[in-house]
Amino acid sequence: MPDPQGGNHDTAAPGPAPGVNILALIIGQVGLHSTMAGTRMAAPLQALREGYSAWTVGVLMALFAAAPVLLALPAGRLADRHGYHRPVHIAAGLSIAGALLAVLSTWLQGTPHLLLLFAAASLCGGGANVGLIAIQRTAGRSARDSTERMRVFSWLGVAPSLSNVVGPVMAGLLIDGAGFWAAYGFLLLLPLVSVGVARLVPRERPVRLPRPPGRTAWDLWRVPGLQRLMIVNWLLSACWDVHSFAVPILGHERGFSASTIGLVLGVFPLSVSAVRLLIPLLAHRMQEAQVLRAAMVGTGLVFCIYPLVASPWLMAACATVLGVTLGCVQPMIMSTLHRLTPHDRHGEAIALRSMTLNLSSTVMPLLFGAAGTALGVAPLFWLMGASVGGGNWLVRQFDAGSEADAA
């Protein structure tokens, strides 16, 4: 039961998460993320078919990321106070409300129609992020050491890939078959699956740890190593954005067809998913800092080579290697984050990470566009490659104490 005083919680059954528990966390994230991903595909398409401008669509897309920035810290504190179940129920409520507003938008025209879509984007984006923070916190706290955390976060890292298939693909089929209202109606049901499987996740018992007066989430920046970890995470996350932004431009310069460019981009998430399925088998041989250093150096090398290749097969090979290097990052980052952060503040730390990455994903494409226009796409690859490769010295600070786990 939640603590009425808002105290922190420990799991009722410490130790490794049972397989059914991990599966419940994965399904819970898929339910929430699929609603967001499906709405993020359908709402812009609906706006375009209604005759709205590309700028309007851009605002609509930005709202999916803006809401998580605003809700991240409250969501982290909520998870620290109440554990898993209350945040996930709230997240499901936000997502259902967003999908319901999207359904209503199909019955209206003009400004009310557009405002409902804006509200739907904000609610679905916020709901997915509130749930993600609670899910990641619970996953990390259910493991006893860094090896188990790497395994858990690797399995959990497959959920976004599944979500980006379930939500958009089903929404697209329903739009073509019955209309937008049917697509949103289907997406409305998915968060109920997250609520249903939540009962399989053990509830947490309250532990009263009074919050020191004046303590804020920003105090976590003083935790040794956390600032460096966030910088490393930001550098590697920016590489995802650079790849998504620059590869279509590079392919266009090479004269590739749209389908060829799509295939080059498509092998990247497949490689990410493959490496995350492989990590649980090798986790006992891995150390977080070593993997992060290798990922940063490997990513830097791939980015240096990418603009020099002219064949689509070689570009696909670069995308595959990049999927391996970047795909192994999240489990290592999340495992290190849980090790560095005080036990009672995991939710706040995950929220800071979420807020930083969502803000970066909102701002960085604008900077990439300006840099690409001024310098060209090749220097953008090389600049990012040099930054992420040279930044691997930051990870050396994580070696000390990597064996000592705050389980």
Image: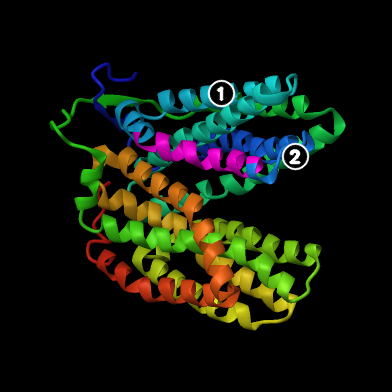
* SS for callout 1: helix
Please say which color scheme the image uses.
Answer: rainbow
Confirm whether the magenta stretch covers residue 64.
yes
- Residue positioned 56% across, 62% down in the render: 369
- Residue positioned 19% across, 25% down in the render: 208
The residue that disc 1 covers is 196
The quarter holding residue 53 reads: top right
The residue that disc 2 covers is 48
Which SS type dominates the magenta stretch? helix
Judged by depth in the image, the label closer to the viewer, 1 or 2, is: 2
Q: Position of residue 365 (x, y in %)?
A: 54, 57
Circle 1/circle 2 CB separation < 8 Å: no
The quarter holding residue 245 reads: bottom right
Confirm whether the magenta stretch covers residue 323.
no
* Alpha carbons under labels 1 and 2: distance apart: 35 Å
Lateral position of residue 129 relative to residue 47, left or right: left
- Residue positioned 34% across, 18% down in the render: 1
The quarter holding residue 302 reads: bottom right
Vertical order, 113 against 23 (above or below): above
- For the residue marked with disc 2, what is the amino acid? Leu
Q: Would you say residue 32 is visible in this rendering? A: yes
Q: Position of residue 16 (x, y in %)?
A: 39, 43
Badge 2, how many Cα within 10 Å: few under 14, some, many 20+? some
Vertical order, 342 against 379 (above or below): above
Region in magenta = 56-73
* Nearest the eye: 323 or 218: 218
Q: Mark 2 or mark 1, which is nearer the start of the sequence? A: 2
Q: Position of residue 33 (x, y in %)?
A: 58, 38
* Nearest the eye: 108 or 84: 108
